[in-house]
Image (cartoon, helix red, strand yellow):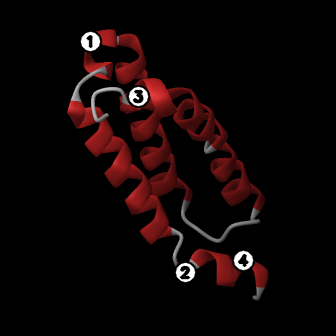
């Protein structure tokens, strides 16, 4: 199960990470109140790691990919813990 994680969720993770670029536009437009440079670094770092996983097919079956995707999503949950209330109720 751990070895096949990328085959199960890889396309959806790739699509979601591609859409995360919209965060940068939200910051630039003033919709989201955050600093652009740290978010830009974070988005580009995640996109780079995802591209490495996509391009190197031998890595896709490793259990470390499951661990990476798990912590990746947990950190995003922690990051957005306070943001929804700030966005909808200023």
Separation of residues labelled 2 and 4 (CA atoms): 9 Å
Q: Residue at x 56, y 56 (%)?
A: 36
> Can you give x and y, in whole percent of width and height, for residue 75 in the image?
39, 61
Above or below: residue 87 compared with residue 21: below
Foreground label between 4 and 1: 1
Say whether disc 4 or disc 1 marks the residue closer to the N-terminus.
Answer: 1
Q: Which residue is mark 1?
A: 58
Q: Residues within 10 Å of mark 1 (few under 14, many from 20)?
A: few
Instruction: Kindly indicate whether the residue at mark 1 contacts the one at mark 4 (C-beta within 8 angstroms).
Output: no
> SS class of the residue under badge 4?
helix
Q: Residue at x 32, y 21 (%)?
A: 60
> SS class of the residue under badge 1?
helix
Quarter where residue 2 is shown: top left
Q: Which residue is mark 2?
A: 82
Mark carried by residue 6: 3
Instruction: Kindly indicate whether the residue at mark 1 contacts the one at mark 3 (C-beta within 8 angstroms).
Output: no
């Amino acid at each position: 199960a751990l070895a096949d994680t990328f085959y199960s969720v890889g396309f959806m993770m790739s699509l979601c990470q591609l859409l995360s670029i919209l965060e940068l536009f939200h910051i630039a437009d003033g919709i989201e109140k955050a600093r652009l440079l740290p978010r830009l670094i974070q988005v580009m770092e995640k996109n780079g790691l995802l591209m490495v996983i996509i391009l190197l097919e031998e890595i896709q079956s490793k259990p470390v990919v499951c661990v990476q995707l798990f912590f990746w999503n947990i950190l995003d949950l922690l990051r957005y813990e306070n943001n929804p209330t700030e966005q909808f109720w200023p």
